[in-house]
Amino acid sequence: MGEQHGTSMADAIDVMISEYVGAEIEEDVLRADVLARIKAMKGALPDWYLRELTACAKAAGVDADVLLYAQCEGDIKSFWKCTSYVAYGEATDEGKVEIGRNFDYWGLGATDRCVKTFVFIPDPGDGYAFVSVGWSGILGGWTFYNEKGLFACCNLGGYASKNPTGVPALVLLRMIAQKAANVDEAVSLVRTTPRMRGAALVLGQSGGAGSNPRGVVVQYDSERVDVEEAKDGLAFHSSVGTNRGTLRDILRKANRKPTDAIHWAGNSITLHSVAIRPAENAIWVAHGLPEFAHRGGYVKYDLEELLKR
């Protein structure tokens, strides 16, 4: 997967690194102080992840440590602000699961050259296939949905304690997407993985195959993990001031578009916007260029077709 990623997106990876990591690079390698921080946290990363990252970097013709630094967004560098929710039962007009996610971020001007909707299909026995929305060169992204019906994303939030040798939020998200089949397994991964810095995760499972729909918000830092269950069928977190009550009102409206609720929650820095209806095996994705993601419109994908092995 790493080799395919690096080979097919080499030019876009160069753009991402130039804009996103460029200030920390001297003569094609990271500054000594940044490199020391990268080496300090490598021991906490799974071997399978490091192998994929190394293969991606080699195929793209970039330094592996530089590419790893890009995966530390939010922990070593800056943070994103977002609105995310998992809704079901009394929170939606038909009671079915609906998922929404806006990724709001300042800092990448060439969004139209870097944004991607990925499909990752690991080898049998190495984890679950998943769809993710992110940028070229980021091994996963910010918004995930896997073949077991597990949704995961990351918002600005959490607490203040830090561990420089812990796992960055984007890598933890990737671990959840590939290795967790449900919310309990995802939360267990968060609890048992050394964590670099605080963040807020929104996790959801679609139900089916004997399981019930579920949504939680997980707030954590290097020392603490708190799990908040959905209230009245809505697990919701926003770091841009989205109004929970108005969102709930929209979700309860009949005959609306699947994207209406998350579209309403967008703003001028929404770099991607995602709506998911598991019962319809459908995901809608809009990318910013680099502004309000919805201006370009949403593209609908068939999840069953994307995740078919």
Image (tube, grey):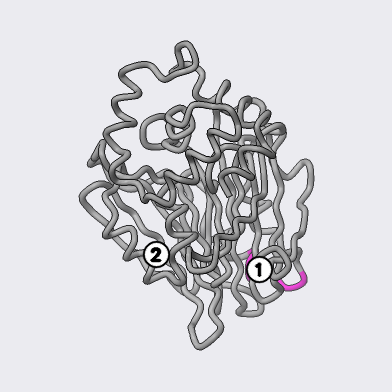
Up-down: is 33 above or below 8?
Answer: above
The residue under the point 64% across, 72% down is: 278
Cα–Cα span, label 1 and label 2: 23 Å
Q: Is residue 156 magenta?
A: no
Question: Does residue 85 appear anywhere in the picture?
Answer: yes
Residue 303 point in image, percent of width and height: 69, 66
| Residue placed under numbered mark 2 in the picture | 186
Amino acid at pointer 2: Ala
Which span of residues is magenta-colored? 250-255
Residue 203 point in image, percent of width and height: 46, 63
Q: Main secondary structure of the magenta part?
A: loop
Pick the front one: 39 or 71 = 39
Dot 2 surroundings within 10 Å: few (below 14), some, or many (20 or more)?
Answer: many
Residue 198: quadrant of the picture: top left
The residue under the point 68% across, 28% down is: 11
Q: Secondary structure at mark 1?
A: loop
Residue extending farthest to the bottom is 210
Left or right: residue 47 versus residue 83 is: left
Amino acid at pointer 1: Arg
Residue 272 point in image, percent of width and height: 64, 44
Residue 79 point in image, percent of width and height: 44, 35
Pick the front one: 116 or 5 = 5
| Residue placed under numbered mark 1 in the picture | 309
Pick the front one: 257 or 205 = 205
Q: Is residue 251 magenta?
A: yes
The residue under the point 59% across, 73% down is: 97
Up-down: is 126 above or below 80?
Answer: below
The residue under the point 50% across, 71% down is: 205
